[in-house]
Image: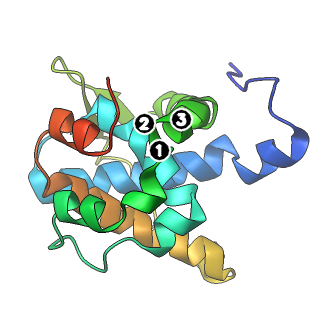
Amino acid sequence: MNHININLAHDEFNLYNPAYCGFLLNTIIREYYSSKKNGMPSALVYLCLPILLTTPIRNNLPKSKSTNILSWVNHNKSLLIDFPDTVHCFFKVSQPAIDFIYGQNLISINDNGEIIPNTNIKITANPILFKSSISMSSHLSNSKLIGRWFAASPDAKTIYSTLGIRP
């Protein structure tokens, strides 16, 4: 089943390939799960790719999860002025990626609406392919950070309001 929005130009589709973005989301979800030992609130997954794939935001992410998301947002307000619109625009990238990893049985959704990784399926954490590009390597390392960072953060409502987004 193909959930790709036909409004994406060919170049945009290649850049935001559901398998590639899905791998990044799966990495985030696995890191979240390994840090917190419970599922990631499904609302948070829609914030991940806009943070990760927006270069100025990604380049200013903290180096570790110990930096509180609230203080990071306060120090980076200028990068996040249009973030709610960015999240809205990224929906057509995020949803096919989520559909892809769900369709591959890499994730499931529990009764609380949390996304759980399928830990029975072994996935290489650091594929060689990601070492061939500085950008891809940055995406992967920051995916791991975002998963741990969100796990160490307050609840999803607080993260949404801190980023200026109304669920």
From this viewpoint, is residue 125 visible? no
Q: CA distance from mark 2 to mark 1?
A: 12 Å
For discs 3 and 2, the disc positioned in front in the rendered view:
3
- Mark in front: 2 vs 1: 1
User: Between disc 3 and disc 2, whose residue precedes?
Assistant: 2
- Label 2 neighbourhood size at 10 Å, few (<14), some (14-19), many (20+)? some
Give x and y (percent) for residue 102.
46, 30
Residue 135 location, x and y as percent? 63, 75
Q: Position of residue 132 (x, y in %)?
A: 69, 82
Check contact, mark 1 vs mark 3: CB within 8 A.
Answer: yes
Residue density around tag 1, few if under 14, some if 14–19, many if 20 or more, within 10 Å? many
How far is the residue under mark 1 from the one under mark 3? 5 Å
Q: Say which quadrant the C terminus sits in.
A: top left
Label number found at residue 135: none
**Considering only order in the chain, which callout, 1 or 2, is on the residue closer to the N terminus?**
2
Q: Secondary structure at mark 1?
A: helix
- Under mark 3, the amino acid is Asp
Q: Give the residue drawn at x 30%, y 53%.
A: 30
Looking at the image, which is closer to me, 109 or 47?
47
Q: Quadrant of residue 130?
A: bottom right
What is the x, y in percent for residue 112?
A: 15, 20
Q: Which residue is mark 2?
A: 46
Pointers 3 and 2 in contact (C-beta within 8 Å): no
Q: Secondary structure at mark 2?
A: helix
The amino acid type of the residue labelled 1 equals Phe
Residue type at tag 2: Tyr
Which residue is drawn at the image coordinates 31% and 30% (left, top)? 43
Q: Quadrant of residue 4?
A: top right
Residue tagged 1? 83
Reply above or below: 39 against 154: above
